[in-house]
Image (tube, rainbow, N blue to C red):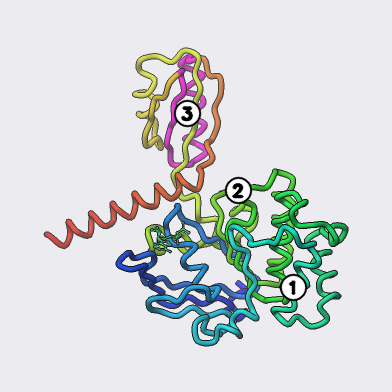
Amino acid sequence: MEELNEPVMIAVERLTKFYGNARAIEDISFSCRRGEIVGFLGPNGAGKTTTMRILTGYLPPTSGVARIAGYNTLTDSLQAREHLGYLPETVPLYREMSVEGYLAYIGRLRRVPNLWERIDEVLDAVGLAERAGSYIGHLSKGMRQRVGLAQAMLHNPEVLILDEPTIGLDPRQVVEVRELIKELGQRHTILLSTHILGEVEQLCDRVIMIIDGHIYADMPTSGLMGPNTVIRLHLASPSRDTARILRSLVGVQDVTNGADGVYHVRYDGGDETRAAIASTAVNASWGLLELTVERPTLESIFLERLREAEQRQAQTMEEEEE
Ligand code: ADP
């Protein structure tokens, strides 16, 4: 990959954070290079926000180091912040300010040179040029999110950290904000957290998955789905033997029988197995109404990974006992 020649812009080295006695993250390490859009995924409480807050310099780690563009976020926090734009999950916007008034205020705090030119540029980039004079309190949620992105980009940082950037937006706004992020990703390094699998697939080259304060996976997005695939069969007239017959097909791993003739068939993902499931359903005259390959959700992928990790742990313990 050509990206391997690009400089590391986000570096997290053996990061641990305790809140009192409670461990939020433990011994986390990863890095992101220029031009990468990396998805930062995990169930609620996994430690995403804690990691992002340490990266943005808002929170000191208990141990370990976080660097933005090579600068330690704790000891060189000013330089680190110069290279970083942050979109928190809820952006602290001042509702009684105008869009450009707010950006001017933020820009002066950050000592942005040629401030008014830069404000025009970012308003263009986020598609808000025509709303420059509007009160923030009068904007739709999607537009306010774009003001949040505008403030993150204002000082032209090379690194952007975005916490759930499309949460609470309507479908059209989601499309617009994703297009903007994709475009920004060509020149920046972006770490973004999200709960939406489609968003990850659309935007991210790579995903880092964190569960219970540990990193469980760091891999290309294409590897996220894993080999387990589920087919949903809707049958008008299944027989008592339907689940047993499906289970006996080569490549089928498990069959669960839901209500109203709906069966979930876990299989090896192969086209041959899928074809066999379809022809069996037709030949057995079960009244096939629908056959769909179920798309996993991020939550189901987390659960699957968690189960794998627990199985591995149990296996290691057994081996150690032997
Ligand atoms: P995520 O963003 O993935 O939902 P967080 O980083 O917010 O996860 O939380 C990780 C863990 O740390 C959770 O168990 C959470 O309850 C705990 N935690 C987060 N913030 C604080 C805090 N300020 N004080 C005490 N515990 C916290």
Quadrant position of the N terminus in the picture: bottom right
First along the sequence among labels 1 and 2: 1
- Find residue 198 and name its label: 2
The x and y percentages for residue 220 are 54, 61
Q: Amino acid at mark 1?
A: Tyr
Marks 1 and 2: which is nearer the front?
A: 1
The x and y percentages for residue 293 are 54, 35
Where 321 falls versus 8 (above or below)? above
Q: CA distance from mark 1 to mark 2?
A: 36 Å
Which residue is more in the foreground, 78 or 186? Answer: 78
Which residue is more in the foreground, 38 or 142? Answer: 142
Residue position marked by numbered label 3 in the rendering: 277
Whether the magenta-drawn stretch holds residue 272 is answered as: yes
Q: Secondary structure at mark 2?
A: helix
Q: Amino acid at mark 3?
A: Ile
Q: Secondary structure at mark 1?
A: helix
The x and y percentages for residue 80 are 59, 81
Which residue is more in the foreground, 85 or 290? Answer: 85
x 44%, y 44%: residue? 228
First along the sequence among labels 3 and 1: 1
Q: Amino acid at mark 2?
A: Gly
Q: Would you identify the image quadrant in which residue 181 lies?
A: bottom right
> Are dots 3 and 1 in contact, CB under 8 Å?
no
Start and end of the magenta stretch?
260-286
> Are dots 2 and 3 in contact, CB under 8 Å?
no
Residue position marked by numbered label 1 in the rendering: 105
